[in-house]
Amino acid sequence: MDEKVRKEILNAYEFRKQWPPYTYREYFDVTPELLNDFTDFLKTENTSKKKKELQPWVTFCDSRCSFCYYPSTMFRGEFVDPYLAALKKELKMYSETKYVKTSEFDEIVLGGGTPTVLSAEQLIDIISFCEKNFNISSDYMIKITGSTHNLDEYKLKKFAEYGVLQLDVGVQTFNDDIRRKLFIQDSGEHAEQIIREARELGLYVCIDLMYNLPGQTMEIWRDDIKKAIELDLEGVDCYPLEVYPGTILEKQLKNGELPPPGDWKTEALMYVEAVEMFTKAGYIPVGHDRFTRVREHIEESCLNGWPWAGILTTGAGCFMGYLGRYSYQNTENVREYLEKVSHGIFPIAKIYKSSDEDMIKKVMERLYLRLPVDKKEFREKFGKLPEEVFPEAIKRLKEKGLIEVDDDAIRITKLGDIWRINIAWEFANAKAVY
Ligand code: SF4
């Protein structure tokens, strides 16, 4: 890379942030008042008319990757039946509310944890329960999150026969040395074989790849991207490594068992490499971290409708729920989850109710999602243009070459794409004049 380009990329900020604003990390512990407020909200009609995602969560996993900070519970056979019964009960509780009855869902996404730790029949049973109890669009998509180490030909065939559109698989890297160090259960070759089988059966496959892993050189990262392109995947989500407190990885790094990951500059340049290689291969950057080559990802209503669409998530540990102004995370503890649901209580552990100002800032977060901020729509909602609400932030970002502003919309530039999370934080921390 040309030194001038490298400097331009790295000079925009002094540090590349890893996580955008308005995530579960900022939610408050639930109180009886907040829970009442939320349940009162569920008694109202949904007037936004944006289609939503329905996301039942299978909390179990049969492994512990060293970097993993997702709330999951070690798989134990005796927990499964009570958990699935509670999951259905929680789904039913939501489905009977006015807000959900007046909402339409065009995606059923089994998240987790690792849903594929369960049998194909158990997963299809959850999907079919959702289909029967919610207003599902005629052109809806079914997606299942999983791991290649617990997927096999039988499960893949059952998913394909049922009409599952996509498997979201956490590959992270195909490099066996790094996979072993991160305690990923199977080999890169096995992951590749499962992906090929799934694609032969007509399933879309979208994988997670991580960059800036300990011991991962730029060459290894390029090999991972090359492999993803060679596999002709429908989508690839590229995440930078985040060393989360309390993970095994944090201990491995402290004890010197693993070399430290690169600094933020290395991380940013690895991202730039991904952008270049994927776009050259015909992929388009969309949403949080995805490179895609399919229409379904580009047109996804839940993504394009941010922040007015919604994700109805259920299950122990689920953390990506947002309905109206409420964002929520469920309790991680399975016993507590079962107990709450058995008493007909929404098992929410943390919740956040967005203020008017938060909603304005969330609209600007569309830039982080690689979406335009439509100025006409913004004025219709808030009575002012974005430049009037955030004069300084917009001026600064424009001068830095991170955003483009024309008469119709605000968009991120190619340089801004590298700094999307910092841009989102600029608006979250700015004073909104409205
Ligand atoms: S397979 Fe997924 S949920 Fe399970 S430990 Fe690894 S990253 Fe975490």
Image (cartoon, rainbow, N blue to C red):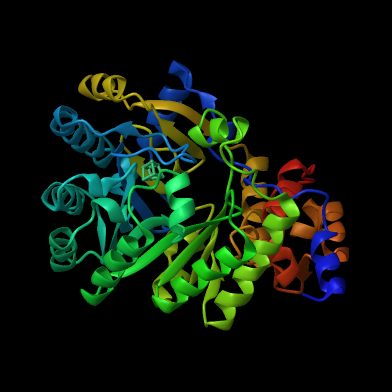
**Relative vertical location of residue 154 with respect to residue 127 in this rendering, above or below:** below
Residue occupying image coordinates x 85% and y 65%: 7
In percent of width and height, residue 280 lies at 58, 82
Q: Is residue 307 visible?
A: yes
Front-most of residues 61 and 390 = 61
Side of 107 where 425 appears, left or right: right
**Relative vertical location of residue 203 with respect to residue 182 in this rendering, above or below:** below
Quarter of the image where one finds residue 428: top right
Front-most of residues 414 and 62 = 62
Side of 148 where 403 appears, left or right: right
Count of residue discs: 0
In percent of width and height, residue 78 lies at 14, 28
**Relative vertical location of residue 19 with respect to residue 72 in this rendering, above or below:** below
Front-most of residues 199 and 288 = 199
In percent of width and height, residue 116 lies at 24, 49
Residue occupying image coordinates x 70% and y 55%: 383
Side of 56 where 309 appears, left or right: right
Residue occupying image coordinates x 62% and y 44%: 259
Q: Is residue 413 visible?
A: no
In percent of width and height, residue 304 lies at 50, 63
Q: Quadrant of ligand 1?
A: top left
* Quadrant location of the N terminus in the rendered image: bottom right
